[in-house]
Amino acid sequence: MDILKVNNFGFCYRNIFTLNNIHFTIKKGEIFGIIGESGSGKTLFSHSVLRLFNDNEISNINGSIEFCGKNILKLSQKEMRNLRGKEISYIPQEPLSALNPLHTIKKQIIEMIKIHNKNLDSQTINNRFLELLNLVGLDSTFALKFPHELSGGQRQRVLIAIALANNPKIIIADEPITALDANLQIQILDLLKSLKERLNISIILITHNVNIVSKYAQNIIVLKGGSIVESGDISILSNPKSDYLKNLISSLHIPKTHLKIADSILLSVENLSVKHLSKKHMFGKNEYKQILNNINFTLHKGSILGVVGESGSGKSTLALSLIKLLDYSGDISFEGRNYKDIVDFRHFRKHIQIVFQDPFSSLNPRHRIRDIIKEGLEVHYKGKDSSHLIIDFLKCVGLDSTFAHRFPHELSGGQRQRVSIARALILNPELLILDEPTSALDKITQKQILELLLDLQIKFNLTYIFITHDLYVVRSICDKVLILKDGNIKEYGDIEILENPQNPYTKTLIESIL
């Protein structure tokens, strides 16, 4: 039985992007893959199925999208509201942005049940809520937690629970695992597959990871620039016809054109430990959770250190400690100067900059790109003429001057990440901390960003700490690697240790690569 049929569908979005002649059919109980690089039109198409556009944003609509025999494009807004979240559900890419930070998990899941079931009594709703938690592998203790108290994998499970709330016929999963480590990726994908089989629902799996599609989907389309490049069952991945698909499949082979690693040490970390307050008591001692435990390493000028570990291992905590945004014990020294001896660390922070994992959240959506890049200059170099510098640094990261006037939502993921890099570089730092800068990007864009970073390293004499869960990336560009688990170093040394890992955890990470 055909659940969704797309016939030569297309339209123009804001006169800047066009979807052309999209056509495919999804059967009941099928996982259907849509793959392509950033900006290829994957998310734009998923929003089309749900009609999430204002009428003034789109033009030249043609073709049809038939759901259970009804053309979605012909439905009224009221009919679409009844359809969204009930018959067709959506799992967005960024769970932390999608979940309301002020509401508990229970409130957010129950809200979706109530929207489409106004006559249900509270007991029935609560039973359904507990059933949904159980379906996605969470227990009742998560009910009163807030999104920030959950790990990335747990937040993604909450989004899946919300998507399942009303027994939909189709779930659109838009890059559901991009920010997760390899072990969690497999857990979430296996969960989606088991739910598909148990509930007999169809899943549209949108991703840039060809390996994921090959293991979990039955049929696929490959998008580029809003058009289908190739389509068929997953056997087309074994014999790609187009150069584009061949590039998506090919691994990251990047020649190491690094700086010559200097003898001098730029950063030294000794016995670094971080603990968070886990429970506060009015009377008696507060309880703390150890996040990092006695971390030791050195970073030479011109080198690239890869920090690898699963979600919750302490990678981002380490990054925030290194720019003194978290309290810590132990010693961190930069060019021989202990952080504890630096009086004005806010002014000193221009020497160490960070590029965050999610550029969409780290870029102010209300500011134009020129103002975002200029912000650091206004803090550290008040009164300095920055207009020409902004254009120069945009060009350094491969963007032309027209990007200065755009807003973040008008850029692709790769373009937003280039803006984040430009914002960090404009302060002329010596150390750049890159916290999962390519995790949400397709392989082609990943390669472009990594090549850009290597070029910029030589141009600006930079040293990098590259935090990631992607061992492919680490092997491609790093000189040394540090493996973290539960706040402890499991292995540390030259990149060659990945070829012959001694620790069982490192072996597990390597084996779980998708």
Image (spheres, grey):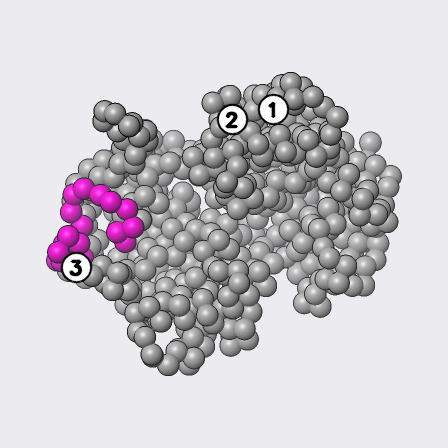
Question: Can residue 289 be seen from the camera position used here?
Answer: no
- Residue placed under numbered mark 3 in the picture: 343
Instruction: Say which residue appears at 82% left-offset and 42% top-offset.
Output: 79
Tell me which segment is drawn in magenta.
323-342
Question: Which mark is drawn over residue 129?
Answer: 1
Instruction: Say which residue appears at 71% left-offset and 51% top-offset.
Output: 52
Element carrying mark 1: helix
Q: Nearer the viewer, residue 493 or 422?
A: 422
Above or below for 406 versus 508: below
Q: Are marks 2 and 1 in contact (CB under 8 Å)?
A: yes
Mark 2 / mark 3, whichever is N-terminal = 2
- Residue placed under numbered mark 2 in the picture: 143
Above or below for 213 versus 55: above
Q: Nearer the viewer, residue 235 or 316?
A: 316
> Counting other residues with Cα less than 10 Å from the Cα at mark 3, is it few (<14), some (14-19), or many (20 or more)?
few
Query: Residue 229 location, x and y as percent?
Result: 69, 55
Going by the numbered disc 2, the residue's amino acid type is Ala
Q: Residue furthest front?
A: 282
